Structure formats: C-alpha cells, structure tokens
Image (cartoon, rainbow, N blue to C red):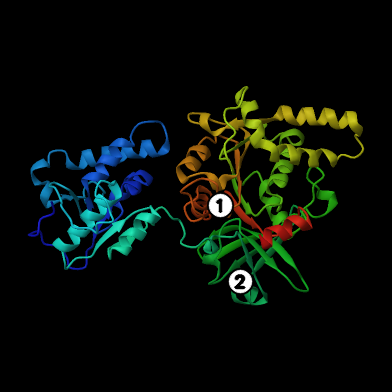
C-alpha cells in the first residue's frame, strides 16, 4: 500500500489505472509525467486472464506484464514506498508506481456487488481518496460505463488521452491552403520566378513560410486563379511549383480527368515519382480509389515505373460476420474488394474504341497486374517497385499502419485511402485512428503528400445522403 510518509509535491495526482488502459497501450505507465500511478490487484488479475491468444489485446497484456516485471524486479521489499519510474522511462516520467500490497475493504453503496471486477477497482479509488484527502485521486479508464459509475459515486474519472493524435478531427491537416493577394505582398520581398520543363516556379521569403508544409496545395481564387504545390521549405524561404492540369482531357490518366481542384492535386501527388507516400482522405464518392487505381495502372502498364499494384484492406465487417470463406488468400479477399471491381469497371469503359473483345483482354491484363493481399500475412515481407494501396485505412491502428508502411522497399509507393468518419473497428476513434496518425506524422516530410477531398463526384443521390444522413 502507498506510504503516507513519502513526501510528494502537493500538485501531483494519484492515477488509478483500469485494465483496459494497459491493454490499449502497455507504455501507459510511463505517460503520466510527474504523477504517481496505482495498480489495484484486480487490474493485475484481469491482465492475467487476458494474456492468452494472438490478438492485439493479448499481446499488449503480455507486454504490460513484462514492463512491470522489469520495474519491480529486486524491489520487492520496498514496494509499499513505490517504484520510481524515471530511470525505466528514460526521464519521461518522474512519478512512482504503486501496487496494491494489502487487502482493501472499502464501503461502497449496497447496489454495487463487490464481486464484480470494476466495482473492486472503484472500491480501491474510494479507499485511496480517504487515505490521501489532500491529493487528487483519479481513475483512468477507456470504459465509458466505468467512468459514469465512478462519477455517480463522487469519484474523479478520466479517459486515457495519450493515444489520441488530435483532440478534434477538425484540426487535422487538410493538405491545402487558400492564399490571397496579401500572401504575395507579405512574402514576395525577394520574389524570384522562372520557367522550367513547362512548369512555373517561384521562390518566396517571409514570415508565413515556416507555417507551410512540403507538398502542400496552395490555391488562389479570383481573376488569376492559381494552383501550386510547395516544393521545399527551408527556414523562411520556400520554393513553389505550378501544378500539371489533369482536368484537361489531353492529360487524362487512363481516361480519367480531375473534376475539381482537390482531385487535380491528388493526381499530381499520385503521378509524382518523388512522392513516396500519399494519403487521401474524403467521404464516400470523392474519387479516392478511382484516382489511385488510374494513376497506379498508368505507371504500372504504360510507364512501367512499378512492376505491379498490391491492394490490401482491413477485413472489419459493417454488420454481422458471414463466417469463413473458401479458397485461396486472393479468393477469400475478393468479397472485401468490391470497390476494386467497381472501379475497374469504370476504368474499362474509358476505352470506348476497343470493343467488347478488346475490353475483355484489357480487363484480364489489368487483373494480372493487381494482387489482392490480406493484412494477416504482411509481417516480414518487403515490396520492391510496387504500387501499394491501403484501402479503408481509417480502420487500422497506428501499430498496424507502421507494420504496413515499413514493408515498402526501394522504388515502392504507398497510398493510404480512407474516411475517418466511417470507422468500423471497435475502440478506434477519429482521433486515434492509424490514418489520422500518419497524416499528422508525415506532414513535415518532403517525400509525402496529403489531400482531403471534399467534393463528392459519385451522384447527386450519394452527395445528398452524405450531407443529410
């Protein structure tokens, strides 16, 4: 039990961790800075009962147990004084870890049976609150009902926020910035401009430049509309390049032209071999998959930059699961790849002169160059000169996203597509999705680009449904 004699700063808090926090993030014991952490015996019991299996939760439970074993090894006689976290966390946390070393008999309302694990943890929080009246004792849990029960009993409770990249998804980087005439006046003091290879270039200097990101879309409306991308940022100096106009039929990609500004920018990123990592966000019908497949096919079959297209996605059902599927890995993945077939139908129709036989031959050629892979078998693989498409990426955790992106070998381009308002994975939110994570982490890298597609181009019915439903 935590000792009363230990001197603690008055403003440090006492956090009691629920099991789901450790199973969500095993490193959470190092994430509370100067505050102390208390682990009830029931938390350790639940960790033990959840450690079996190959699921992400079971792996995290085992990892959390390993961290604690390393912390308390050789300190068994001083556990009641707390185990300092500073050395193990490499300075990230300066508080101590306390384990429950004695039985706690706390008086909770009779309606809460003490046999239930959650109620035993609430009993521990209540007991600590009485033992340390001058310190703030807070329960940290990912379980909403647990937090509601704690607050109903007058106990402080919080969600675990450390996994969230952003508090509000509205703050997520969109990849574009509207500029006005005042932008050029403020940042055009030593303006240089030149033409090269059919593109226009500008070198600007000013106080707004440090806020720009590499491969960001800059657009200007008005009498002289402009669409350009930030080529490089160096301190207060930035180089800007005009975009190639993919909305014109002469620049069509596999018969597909950009229908709006964001799609044009997306095609500029997808067709640029210097951009290794592209993320496209947008609601249903904005053209994410169609644009990506068109760019992939052009660079695989025509310019032969990549040897083949690999497409993968998380197999999370929207409704009830339909059970096991027969066949090979490719055949099992086909029901999940309806989006791929739908888009191939559209891309096939763009060649109106080929006739039925020609289109059938093209379709067979295309299918031979597109491989559909399951996420389950990605560990240990390396993809060389491939165009890797990760569809429905909002359903991936940050750890799964890291596993996938680190598969990329030399000459491989990775494209992540998703809509963060359509998350089907339990326990993932817009703020903690792997897609949000990579958009935020990659925005400063010069070989990555991101754009949020805003205009739906599917049909007036789909656009209206997306707005009102």
- On the picture, is 250 further left or further right than 216? right
- On the picture, is 353 further left or further right than 417? right
Q: Which residue is mark 2?
A: 190
Residue closest to the eye, 412 or 352? 352
135 is higher (above) or lower (below) than 20:
below
Disc 1 crowd rating (10 Å Cα; few below 14, some 14-19, many 20+) is some
Residue closest to the eye, 139 or 452? 139
Residue 219 percent coordinates (x, y):
68, 65
- On the picture, is 34 further left or further right than 417? left
The residue that appears at 16% across and 67% down in the rendered structure is: 133
Q: Secondary structure at mark 1?
A: loop
Residue closest to the eye, 343 or 369? 343
Q: Residue furthest front?
A: 110
Which label number is shown at residue 468? none
Kindly report the distance in space between the C-alpha atoms of the residues bearing marks 2 and 1: 23 Å
Q: Secondary structure at mark 2?
A: loop
Disc 2 crowd rating (10 Å Cα; few below 14, some 14-19, many 20+) is few
- The quarter holding residue 312 reads top right
The residue that appears at 67% across and 76% down in the rendered structure is: 181
Q: Are marks 2 and 1 in contact (CB under 8 Å)?
A: no
- The quarter holding residue 221 reads bottom right
Is residue 69 shown to the viewer in this render? yes
The residue that appears at 58% across and 55% down in the rendered structure is: 421
265 is higher (above) or lower (below) than 352:
below
- On the picture, is 55 further left or further right than 214? left
Residue closest to the eye, 171 or 151? 151
Choose mark 2 or mark 1, whichever is in front. Answer: 1
Mark nearer the N terminus (2 vs 1): 2
Q: Which residue is mark 1?
A: 446
């Amino acid at each position: 039990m935590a000792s009363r004699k230990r001197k603690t700063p008055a403003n440090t808090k006492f956090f009691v961790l629920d099991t789901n926090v450790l199973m969500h993030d095993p490193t959470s014991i190092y994430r509370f800075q100067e505050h102390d952490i208390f682990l009830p015996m029931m938390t350790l019991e639940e960790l033990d009962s959840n450690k079996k299996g190959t699921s992400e939760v079971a792996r995290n439970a085992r990892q959390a147990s390993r961290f604690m074993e390393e912390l308390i090894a050789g300190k068994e006689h001083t556990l009641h004084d707390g185990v300092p976290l500073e050395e193990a966390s490499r300075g990230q946390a300066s508080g101590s870890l306390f384990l429950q070393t004695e039985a706690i008999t706390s008086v909770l309302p009779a309606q809460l049976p003490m046999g239930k694990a959650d109620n035993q943890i609430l009993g521990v929080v209540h007991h600590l609150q009485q033992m340390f009246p001058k310190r703030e004792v807070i329960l940290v849990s990912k379980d909403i009902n647990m937090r509601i029960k704690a607050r109903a009993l007058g106990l402080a409770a919080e969600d675990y926020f450390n996994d969230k990249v952003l508090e509000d998804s509205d703050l997520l980087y969109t990849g574009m910035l509207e500029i006005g005439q005042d932008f050029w006046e403020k940042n055009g003091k030593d303006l240089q401009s030149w033409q090269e290879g059919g593109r226009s270039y500008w070198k600007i200097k000013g106080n707004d430049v440090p806020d720009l990101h590499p491969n960001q879309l800059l657009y200007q409306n008005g009498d002289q509309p402009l669409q350009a991308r930030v080529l490089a940022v160096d301190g207060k100096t930035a180089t800007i390049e005009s975009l190639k106009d993919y909305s014109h039929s002469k620049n069509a990609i596999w018969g597909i032209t950009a229908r709006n500004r964001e799609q044009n920018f997306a095609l500029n990123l997808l067709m640029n071999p210097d951009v290794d990592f592209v993320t496209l966000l947008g609601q249903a019908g904005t053209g994410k998959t169609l644009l990506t497949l068109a760019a992939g096919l052009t660079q695989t079959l025509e310019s032969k930059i990549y040897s083949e297209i690999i497409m993968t996605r998380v197999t999370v059902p929207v409704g009830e699961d339909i059970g096991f599927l027969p066949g090979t890995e490719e055949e099992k993945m086909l029901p999940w790849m309806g989006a791929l077939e739908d888009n191939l139908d559209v891309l096939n129709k763009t060649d109106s002169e080929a006739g039925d036989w020609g289109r059938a031959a093209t379709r067979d050629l295309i299918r031979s160059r597109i491989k559909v892979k399951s996420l389950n078998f990605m560990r240990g693989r390396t993809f060389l000169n491939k165009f890797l498409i990760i569809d429905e990426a909002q359903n991936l955790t940050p750890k799964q996203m890291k596993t996938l992106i680190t598969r990329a070998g030399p000459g491989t381009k990775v494209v992540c597509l998703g809509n963060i308002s359509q998350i089907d994975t339990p326990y993932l939110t817009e703020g903690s999705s792997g897609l949000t994570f990579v958009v935020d982490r990659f925005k400063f890298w010069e070989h990555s680009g991101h754009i949020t597609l805003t205009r739906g181009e599917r049909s007036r019915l789909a656009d209206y449904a997306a707005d009102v439903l």
